[in-house]
Amino acid sequence: MSKRAAPFYCPYCGDEDLRPSEQGHGAWECAACNRAFQLKFLGLLARGLQHNDAGGEEI
């Protein structure tokens, strides 16, 4: 298993000044916009990606 992956930028403001939060596993704080967020891996899709003829993803 690999080490914990870190986000490269804040999903709210796009800044790169991120720090791990004390709130728990996967929690991060952005010093630029003063927001906290949490990342969580949900799992792999069983069916994978399916493309239709129009070039978009089929849901």
Image (spheres, rainbow, N blue to C red):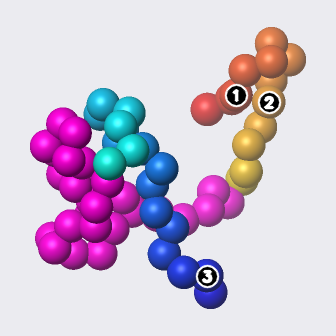
Q: Name the N-terminal-most of marks 2 and 3.
A: 3
Which is nearer the eye, 44 or 26? 26
Which secondary structure lies at badge 2? Answer: loop
Whole-number angstrom distance, CA of label 1 to CA of label 3: 29 Å
Would you say the residues marked 2 and 3 are in contact, meaning their CB atoms lie under 8 Å apart?
no
State which quadrant residue 55 falls in.
top right
For the point 72% across and 53% down, which residue is it?
47
Q: Which residue is mark 1?
A: 57
Q: Position of residue 6 (x, y in %)?
A: 46, 63
Would you say the residues marked 1 and 2 are in contact, meaning their CB atoms lie under 8 Å apart?
yes
Mark 1: which amino acid?
Glu
For the N terminus, which image quadrant? Answer: bottom right
The answer to whether residue 39 is magenta is yes
Which secondary structure lies at badge 1? Answer: loop
Left or right: where 15 falls relative to 21: right
Mark 3: which amino acid?
Ser
Q: Which residue is mark 2?
A: 51
Name the mark on residue 12. none
Which secondary structure lies at badge 3? Answer: loop
**What is the span of residues highlighted in magenta in the rendered image?**
18-46
Left or right: where 39 falls relative to 30: right
Mark 2: which amino acid?
His
Q: Which residue is mark 3?
A: 2
Whole-number angstrom distance, CA of label 1 to CA of label 2: 5 Å
Q: Position of residue 14 (x, y in %)?
A: 38, 33
Whole-number angstrom distance, CA of label 2 to CA of label 3: 30 Å
For the point 51% across and 67% down, which residue is it?
5
Which is nearer the eye, 40 or 48? 40
Marks 1, 3: nearer the viewer: 3
State which quadrant residue 7 falls in.
bottom left
